[in-house]
Image (cartoon, grey):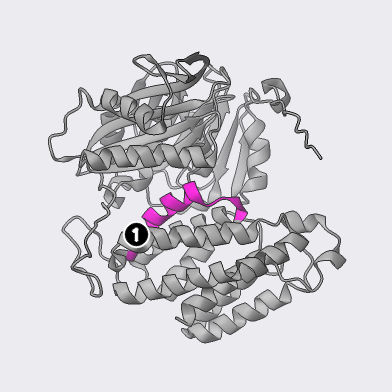
Amino acid sequence: MSLVVEPTHAYSSSQLKLEDPKRWSRLFPLMRPSVKVIELEHGGTIVIDTKLIDTKNVLVAVIGTAGNFSSKILGASHIAAFATEPFGSKSVSAKHVVAALKEQGFPTDNGAVVLRASTKKDLAVSSGLVEVSVIGELKLDHILSLLWVVEIEIKESLVKTQALVEHLVKYSARTTSKFHEKKTGGGPSVVHAIDFAEFKSAQLAVEKDMKHLLGSRPSSGQDIYSIHCADINGLSRLENNILVHEISEFCAKKRLDTRISHSTILDNHSQTRGWAISLCLIPTMFLTAHEKASNTPSKTIGAVAAPTSRQKSSKIQFTDNTVRDIITQGCESVIQAEPTITEYDTIVGDGDCGYTLRDGAKQVLSFIKEQDLTQLPSTLGDLVDNLEVNMGGTSGALYCIFLSSLSQELWTAATFADALNGALEHLLKYTRARLGDRTCLDCLIPFVETLNSTGDARQALEEAKKGVESTKKLEAKLGRSSYLNETTTRGVPDPGAYGLLMLLQGMIKS
């Protein structure tokens, strides 16, 4: 018996309509229910995210290039608006964007920053508006990533935000490396910024780029190395993981204080795959570094750590041993339940839900080994960065959104139940799913609402069980199951809801 696999051919740019500036204004509202599309009088289109209408931060908007598009524009939750336009065109101005936001009720008193991918760099400042043009999507993504992770006092100040953006535009450096069809020696080759070399390993290739970027940029000892890497034209999840890992390992060996972010960039002018890295030394007044893993147990393990002068302090105090036990038992419960979750998803879905949740649980267990869990809010934020690279599927995206929001809520919430409720409200702005739609929310919503109203975790778990049980009789309205006949899903719980229940059950019984 033989198996023949015919190669697939990529769709052309014209078939995908990548040059159509209105492509995402048609598709994005289907992906995020809080999105609203505004048509300008001259024909331009602006996509606005209404979930940020009450923000106290400086408004952030993006004008990208149709065809050369970045995942960061679609994935970043702090972008109030974006538009795309043909390459080299300026069909949508920064003032158009700000005017549209103001008309929709957005607070513009704090000012706005409008970032534009262009063919040249420029920065213009007018009353309450900073318009920044950068060359290509890599720098644009780097700025967007920085504006997400900087201290809250930076986000709320137009003057400080402008100073940060000006610093990055002026002092950042970048390098691009792409695979080439011509072989060098016995293997594939890569066109680096400085030379054409044989690709022997990801480690050596990344080292070459990082040494080039660091060569003329010594640190004063008071700076953070802000590094943004992007895969070009869709490297695999594994390749992206390796890319980020090798950059992190290189910086660790050099003992550099770093903050690393990532995105995917589509280059419509070339189908060549590769990666790009942008690096800038950022003063510590703007940014804090990722916590470094330690090979020795923390002195604060098992006790509440005193925050440093640069750390925020959460109103809720966390004990490492308690948090570690809760997370470990929850993850182990999911891992043990994987065969059952997979069985359910084989009947009503794609069959990968169990593997996705299992692998995500394993990744969490690996991640927390060297973490100080007394600093849970910041640790959760770093965990999301890790899971975004290592956990796929719809489940992975929902967990990352929820955990990212939870990490933010934990800084200010009076109780953990309040933080969960805030994270749930945030998640509901990103998905059309609601209670009764036969999704993981049929478990999450009753759990969070009951915990928030009663403060009783076991009672909340019982309500979550009832929610999961109800999915056996519900008709799927979203996801893969919605394409199946109702008789197929009858009697089978939603796999995502069941998997979440196993997580909660393990955490509460720990």
Q: Is 262 within the magenta?
A: no
SS of the residue under disc 1: helix
Residue in the foreground of this view, choosing between 494 and 2: 2
Which quadrant of the figure has residue 349? bottom right
Q: Residue at x 61, y 72 (%)?
A: 443
Residue in the foreground of this view, choosing between 298 and 276: 298
Q: Is residue 93 above or below residue 510?
A: above
Q: Residue at x 25, y 37 (%)?
A: 225
- The number of discs equals 1
Task: Name which residue type carries label 1.
Answer: Thr
118 on left or right of 483: left
Residue denoted by label 1: 379
Q: Give x and y (percent) for residue 422.
A: 47, 66
Q: Quadrant of the C terminus?
A: bottom left
Confirm whether residue 262 shows in the render: yes
What are the residue bounds of the magenta stretch?
376-394
Q: Residue at x 19, y 55 (%)?
A: 310
287 on left or right of 22: left
Q: Is residue 443 above or below residue 102?
A: below
Q: Quadrant of the N terminus?
A: top right
Q: Residue at x 31, y 61 (%)?
A: 371
